[in-house]
Image: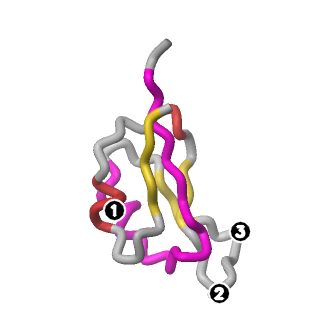
Amino acid sequence: MAIKTIVEFSEDRCKGCELCVSVCPKKILFINEDKVNSKGYHPAGVTDTNLCIGCGSCTMICPDGAIRLYKK
């Protein structure tokens, strides 16, 4: 079985700054305009976690530590 990378967002920590969206090489991250978190921001999300290559760019650039990558 292949190891899969899971991208997990802590939506309530996200301020919707779009930094993660700008650095994703696979372009699978987006700002969810249909959702508002507890702080009043539109949080980031992932369109298809199966396309994630686990590079970690999003976790490194996130100023709020709202993104976690792990292997499954």
Q: CA distance from mark 3 to mark 2?
A: 12 Å
Find residue 59 and report its horizontal and vertical position in percent: 35, 59
Instruction: Name the residue rendered at 29%, 43% in the picture.
Output: 55
Find residue 10 and report its horizontal and vertical position in percent: 56, 66
* Nearest to viewer (mark 2 / mark 1): 2
**What amino acid is found at the position of numbered circle 3 in the picture?**
Asp
- Residue sitting at the far bottom: 39
Crowdedness of circle 1 by 10 Å Cα count: few (<14), some, many (20+)?
some
Query: Dot 3 corresponds to which residue?
Result: 34
Task: Give the answer, above or below, for where 8 lies relative to 62.
Answer: above
Disc on res. 22: 1
Q: CA distance from mark 3 to mark 1?
A: 20 Å
Tag 2 near tag 1, CB within 8 Å: no
Crowdedness of circle 3 by 10 Å Cα count: few (<14), some, many (20+)?
few
Tag 3 near tag 1, CB within 8 Å: no
Task: Give the answer, above or below, for where 25 lies relative to 59.
Answer: above
Could you say which is closer to the camera, residue 29 or residue 72?
72
Magenta extent? 3-24
Instruction: Name the residue rendered at 50%, 41% in the picture.
Output: 6
Query: Dot 2 corresponds to which residue?
Result: 40
Ranked by sequence position, the earlier of labels 2 and 1 is: 1
Instruction: Name the residue rendered at 45%, 55% in the picture.
Output: 68
Could you say which is closer to the camera, residue 19 or residue 70?
70
Ranked by sequence position, the earlier of labels 3 and 1 is: 1
Ranked by sequence position, the earlier of labels 3 and 2 is: 3
Could you say which is closer to the camera, residue 57 or residue 65?
65
| SS for dot 1 | helix
Find residue 37 and report its horizontal and vertical position in percent: 67, 77
Give residue 53's quadrant in the image: top left
Could you say which is closer to the camera, residue 43 or residue 66?
66
Q: CA distance from mark 2 to mark 1?
A: 21 Å
